[in-house]
Image (spheres, helix red, strand yellow):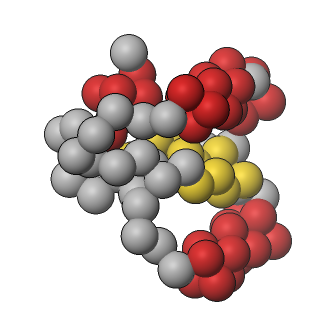
Amino acid sequence: KFKAILDLRDGWALAEWRGWAYVLKSRLGITAYNIAFDDKSYPRQIDVQVALQILQNEENWPILVHCQGGRHKIGRAHV
């Protein structure tokens, strides 16, 4: 069972994301994070730092990392 989800998609409506994050935490015990990585440019340094903190925190393991297409943002997050 995943303990956390790191969503790298941009363009999500904040209210919609908060709704999903609440459902995941309250019903499944999964912490949901969202960092909006733009697939047309390099991510901001602060976003990379936050993503690394989330990924390195063992309390989040196992963690699911995903984005829209799975080609660009995931690679940037795992590098």
Quadrant in which residue 55 is drawn: top right
- Residue 58's place in the image compared with 16, above or below, is above
Q: Which quarter of the image is occupied by the N terminus?
A: top right
Total numbered circles: 0
- Residue 22's place in the image compared with 6, above or below, is below
In the rendered image, is residue 31 in sight?
yes
Most distant residue in the top direction: 79
Is residue 30 rendered to the left or right of residue 47?
right
**Relative image position of residue 29 (x, y in whole percent):** 77, 58
**Going 20% across and 53% down the picture, which residue do you hit?**
69
**Going 38% across and 15% down the picture, which residue do you hit?**
79
Between 1 and 61, the residue placed more toward the observer is 61
**Going 18% across and 39% down the picture, which residue do you hit?**
71
**Going 34% across and 33% down the picture, which residue do you hit?**
42
Between 38 and 1, the residue placed more toward the observer is 38
- Residue 2's place in the image compared with 69, above or below, is above
Between 49 and 26, the residue placed more toward the observer is 49
**Relative image position of residue 58 (x, y in whole percent):** 74, 22
In the rendered image, is residue 27 in sight?
no
**Relative image position of residue 39 (x, y in whole percent):** 26, 47
Is residue 34 rendered to the left or right of residue 75?
right
Quadrant in which residue 49 is drawn: top right
Is residue 78 rendered to the left or right of residue 60?
left
Quadrant in which residue 30 is drawn: bottom right
